[in-house]
Image (tube, helix red, strand yellow):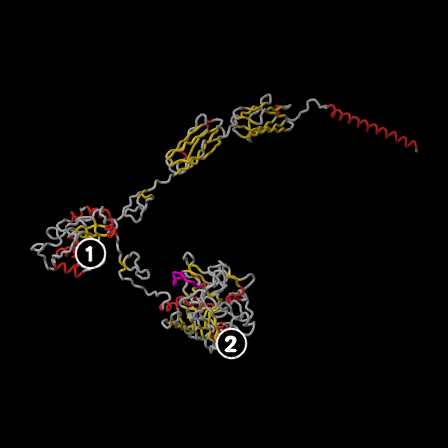
Amino acid sequence: MLPLAHGNMAGDNGVARSLFLSALMITSVMTGILFFGIEEEGANGSPSIDSDVPDTILIGEIETVNISISDEEMGSLSIFITLNGEVVTQTPNSMGMVTLDISSLGVGSHTLQVVATDSLGQETTWAKAFIIHHPEESEAQLTISQSSFEIEQGGSAPISGLVTHDDISTCGLRWSTADIEESSLGLPVGEDGTYGLELSNIQQNTIVSLKVTCGTWIETSSEKNVVITVMIPDPEPVTGCTDPDANNYDSGADEDDGSCNYDEPSRLKILSLHGGGESSSAFESQQGMQDLIGALPEFEFVFVQAPEDGSVWVRDPPGGKEQGTNDPNWADTSINFLDEFVQNNGPFHGLLGFSQGAAMVAIYLAYSDVHFDKVILFNGYLETGHRGLNDTVESESPFDVPALVFEGENDAWFGYGSAELAELFSDVTHLVGSADHHVPISTDREFENVVSFIRDVRQYGCTDPDASNFNNEATLDDGSCNYDSKPVTGSLEWWGEVLLCDSTEQIEPVDDYNTTESDNHLCQLSFEMGETEIIIDSNGIPNHDLESGPGCCTSEQSLEWRIPLVPNNQTGCDPTLSTDGCTMAPERDAVALAVNGVPIFGPEDGPGGDAVAGHEGEYEEDRQHIWLGICHGHSGPGGAYHYHADANCAHWHPDEETNQTWRDYTVDSSRSLSEHSPIVGFAFDGYPIYGFIGWDEEGNVSEVKSSYRLKEGETGYNGINDYEYIIGLGDLDSCNGQFGPTPDYPEGIYHYHTTWENGEGDLGFPYFINCYRGEISLVSQNEEGDGEVDCSGRGETWGPGIGPPPEGCEEGPSGQSSDISSAIGTIYRLVPPSGGILAMMAITA
């Protein structure tokens, strides 16, 4: 076994040695290759490519570039060259150098690529990107010395500035406006870059645009605007006459230049008669007449020449002055002449005569129907020698025209005659001056009195301001006054207009909307006036359709009211401060009378709440069903209709053209009046109650507001006790009245108003009145009048929900707490303190 094994080992060792030697040989070869870089001499590598092409080239700076290609076998190389993708057919020289012409290349990015392949198929690809660029240039810059101008219209604007760039010679500057085409507006630029432009006669706001463009290789631009504001001066004022009343009024004139001219005012004319033997021109030339003309420019003195021979108005008798005449027609020539002259040249305000002209004035007044407002006689006399004329003058006198008779104390001719002339006039002023036989000159002691008399223009007409034709320019009453139909306040006629439903009116039937059939009620009222009171009888039916409400149904009553004609204020009562000292109006009874004869009640209803506040939803009435109908009225026990508020519907009427009915009436119908409300009723103290609309302190029409408001947390459920009076909250005092003028009492009177709002816009409690400003006292009598019973305290100590009434005081059916409505068959008389001027109302079943 061992030899066999040994033998095998020997064989194995030979094989191992062979393998080792082989491995050693391989290792040696590899080691030589790795460590000694042994290459067989003559081995062939891939081609190599190089170039001198830079990354960037300034245009024009380099015209050619070189590419170097090398390989062991240059002759067998295949070379493929492209420039910007286009094939270049140029081949290398013997040194492997290729020179390319790039002078034609433009600015931009370019790519050069070479692919070389040797005979063994080894390939080398070389590529180079380069940029050709222009020389660097600065951007164009434009500056202006002034960017805005404010100039007067027609002025100029000098525009200048500077252009900056590396090469100014390449710059072009242009300017334009909105009105001028840019193409024609080249502007030269100096070598130093300066420029200038002057625009002249500029009429309106302008914007000048400037734009410069520069560059040899690359153009850049710069723009600027110059704003030119034209300051248009205020136009020269147009002068002229600015008075529209002038003849030469110039509507286009801004400033008055004093050139206005006017028609001469219609000057009053005075017909002037010269003395006998004197011409009209000579009379006009007298110093005294010239002084009068100068002192009275508002008058026109018209001088007329006598028609008789010798420049006389009354010719002498045939036998001379001493003989005289009896002919009453002796002066007809002059009379007829003056009639014609006045007709053609009049009218004349006055008639003036001097000497014989004064005598002619007296004759003309006696013989003519021409009217003159005044007569002025200087140094005159009567034509006593002409007995026929003089008798007529005396029989027609005295003349009622105002006359001035002037006598010159030094008049040696006719000084005696002035007194005789003065006796012919019922309204005469007789002056004796220092003149002789001439018109008084300006230095005469009576000259100014003469001027004053002539200037005192008396205007005749009606001078009574209460007359319908009152003339406020009239200075003398001529008895022409007449009076229109408006009656004097407080007169019988006035009451007939204020009160409604009397027998003189056409009464429309009244319907109760709570009944199923037409009721055809009629509102009826009559009255008579006593010395101190007016007595009014009514049936309690209003002059409008109604809604009776829960107290249905309304029926006629027999009511009598006594209203004082002249109210007297209570002493100790100042309602502007409070109700202290004032008689309070009943809360649930009649407090006043409406002009249609319907009672006006206080604000409370039967259960004791504010009937109006409950109706308007201020609180829920849970004690008794109460509601108000048209005009805030309804019926109480016995069918007695009455108002708790408003009552203005007495003066409202449905518009038949729009098919309105009385249901269309609202409170706002009477609150939207454009004039003072009429009287809607009278309180028992005699003072009137007007509607919602009155006059404020400036006399403007406005709604009158109450000064009461609900107390904090109250709603009106407890009636009057829920309200408080606040001074100045509204327009009215604590009684709901005020003193001031009304259409019926322009001089002023205390009066009440119906109110719907207070000064804060809430409900206008107490709606009519809360207390009386005038004197009043309330006394209740039974039907037979057996003594007096004190029924005061109702609503406080007795009444619905409190307790029974005192003996003799009937409480009446529940649902309407009212002395009037409950006292069927009982007379309630309001007795005045001093004997009988207040109101009495009787209600019978």
Give the structural element (helix, strand or loop) at label 1: helix
Quickly name the residue at label 1.
422
Q: Inspect the magenta stretch and tell me whether residue 365 lies in it.
A: no
Towards the viewer: 388 or 176: 388
Residue 46 position within the rendered picture, expressed as x and y whole percent measured from the top left: 65, 26
For the N terminus, the quadrant is top right
- The image quadrant of residue 661 is bottom left
> As drawn, is 667 to the left or to the right of 201?
right
**Label 1 crowd (10 A; few <14 / some 14-19 / many >=20):** many
Quickly name the residue at label 2.
808
Callout 1–callout 2 Cβ contact below 8 Å: no
Q: Is residue 367 above or below residue 287?
A: below
Q: Residue furthest left?
A: 319
Q: Residue furthest top?
A: 95
Q: Is residue 551 above or below residue 286?
A: below
> Of the residues shown, which amino acid type is indicated by label 1?
Ala
Q: Is residue 37 above or below residue 238?
A: above
Residue 808 position within the rendered picture, expressed as x and y whole percent measured from the top left: 51, 76
Q: Main secondary structure of the magenta part?
A: loop
In this rendering, the label closer to the viewer, 1 or 2? 1
| Magenta residue span | 741-752
Towards the viewer: 233 or 419: 419
Residue 450 position within the rendered picture, expressed as x and y whole percent measured from the top left: 23, 51
Give the structural element (helix, strand or loop) at label 2: loop
- The image quadrant of residue 713 is bottom right
Q: Inspect the magenta stretch and tell me whether residue 744 lies in it.
A: yes
> As drawn, is 334 to the left or to the right of 582?
left
First along the sequence among labels 1 and 2: 1
> Of the residues shown, which amino acid type is indicated by label 2?
Gly
